Image (spheres, rainbow, N blue to C red):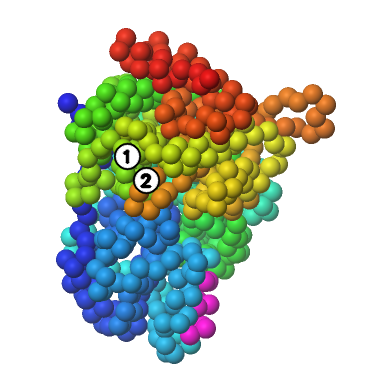
Amino acid sequence: MFESRFQTFEEPEAGNALTARLKALREELARRKLSGFVVPRADQQQNEYVSPSEERLAWLTGFSGSAGLAVVLTNEAALFVDGRYTLQAGKQVDPKAWTVEPLMEPPPESWLATHLKTGDRLGFDPWLHTSAATERMAAACAKAGADLAAVESNPVDAIWTERPGPPLAPVAIHGLQFSGESETQKLGRIRGEIDKLGVDALVLSDSHAVAWTFNIRGADVAHTPLPLSYALVPRDGRPTIFIDHRKLSNATRDHLERSADVREPSALTNELTALAKDAASIALDSATAAEALSRLINAAGGKAVRGSDPVALLRAVKNPTEIAGMRTAHQRDAVALARFFAFLDREAQNGVLTEIDTVQALETFRRDSGVLKDVSFPTIAGSGPNGAIVHYRVTRKSNRRIVPGELLLIDSGAQYQDGTTDVTRTIAVGEPTAEMRDRFTRVLRGHIAIARAVFPDGTTGAQLDTLARQFLWQAGIDFEHGTGHGVGSYLSVHEGPARISKLGSTPLKRGMILSNEPGYYKTDAFGIRIENLELVTATEIAGAEKPMNAFETLTLAPIDRRLIDVKMLSDAEREWLNAYHARVRDEVRPALDDTDKLWLDIATAPLA
């Protein structure tokens, strides 16, 4: 009945089976007279999702998470992951070959400083690390009396005999009916930013920036409609796009050539070198530009100017066309979600459904719209203890049946040409415990606090983050991830630079879209998260002395009333939830059949 076309459930290679690869890498390092090597989970542009040909970390270690780094030394090897992946990493790597270490506190550089020896040569691929990361590694090596050595070719690639080829997905034009702004208009704004920086040119090393600027999309990486590419935008003159010509049809080539010269990716180094020879100052994005680019520019006599990518902030503020598209995408997505949750309530009580069943069902309901391009990330469907794994991804090996008395956390999203969605709901299967209700209601109160926030222009995500945690803190509990991230317009579901978190330093601007997703996770028991997407909008306050902003909730999906302890809610919180559910009912109900309409009426009934 249901199937998945965009997600797989196979268990990645892991554990002891991969130990031979570690041995082969050490032999290759010895041949190159290297004492060790750093293997990041990264491609040349630091993308969240990478193509199969760039999955070096997973191939070597078995760890399949989206963030991590490995260090291989002659007699020891360590895998560094953040808190989201500690449990997962422990299950996927061979514990006799690898130690699992924290990625943040302390950072890998601390480990390097204490494990390297005087005279060691630690290798790294300068195309896979930013300059800032390279400087941190160099400092750690210096502290240990070791040297950091850039390699001309990656030693992992030398032993990866069955490495896939580069992705060659066709490039598509993202028309004005979706983008709302022409390439010429965008380039004009970008050149204004180049003038502010006082540089001669800007390298767009982030494929998201290239896709947004030139109104193109692709499918080179999973779940994000990216064509892998670079661009060089001079202060004066035509920009150049560097992209594999095999991805371009006559129509897409003509589209690009209206505003830019089109070159093969291999031409980037020559063009940068030629520009740098004239002592040009060239701006690079600190977050995505490879150390190799800085070295190339500086070696040729130019000046590499590292800083924030100005296109990231331009892209984060959605224009009216993009906002309208996001609203439409969320209304469409809401119909699929309502059909799915109605199905889940009918079937989950029987104890027959599995986590994979729910993933396949939800994707199928979304595909029924006829316009689903992809899921925006692999669906997280964690029942019972699996829900406590923040970035859990079900495989055929881990797949659990959904049984009464447990919670199901399902975090999913869709890619439509007019918008990207991301929504999490926690569902009670059977009768929830008092503890589940208490924790859920505290998370809900934090979610409502963000949704109802009113804040002056210039407020940062860090200033709002506490609102989501306050009710959890009152019980001595917390969650270890950020409260919210930016979301692209038919681009990445995780988009910078703005975020709602303890580290969110970018001011929130009208037109930005961010997630609102506080949670709570009890290890080996259950997980709770409630996520909607929010649009930053202007709000009017009588007598206000400065411009004020608020959030407009875009996501339209019922929040499970069975998990709410109504006595814990304030009158204002209850009123917000009732108004939200009334809006969900009004906007979604007309598109449902009679059975699902009845379910929605019950799911969105007002709380007394």
Q: Which residue is mark 1?
A: 406
Sequence-first disc among 1 and 2: 1
Mark 1 Cα shell of 10 Å, populated few (<14), some (14-19), many (≥20): many
The answer to whether residue 506 shows anywhere in this view is no
Q: Which residues are magenta?
A: 135-144
Which residue is painted at 44% across and 27% down in the image?
561
The residue under the point 79% across, 34% down is: 546
Residues at circles 1 and 2 in contact by the CB criterion of under 8 Å? yes
Q: How many marks?
A: 2
Q: Which residue is mark 2?
A: 526
Other-residue count near label 2 (Cα within 10 Å), few / some / many at <14 / 14–19 / ≥20: many
Quadrant the N terminus occupies = top left
Q: Nearer the viewer, residue 9 or 238?
A: 9
Closest to the observer, 68 or 138: 68
Residue at (65, 31) in percent of width and height: 550
Magenta span: helix, strand or loop, mainly?
A: helix
Instruction: Measure the C-alpha gap from mark 1 to mark 2.
Output: 7 Å
Q: Is residue 447 magenta?
A: no
Residue type of the residue flagged with mark 1: Glu
Left or right: 530 as drawn, with respect to 428? right
Looking at the picture, how far across and down is residue 453, in whole percent?
64, 34
Q: x, y percentage for residue 283?
A: 58, 56
Type of amino acid at the residue the image marks with label 2: Phe
Q: Residue at x 62, y 26 (%)?
A: 571
Q: Is residue 94 above or below residue 528?
A: below
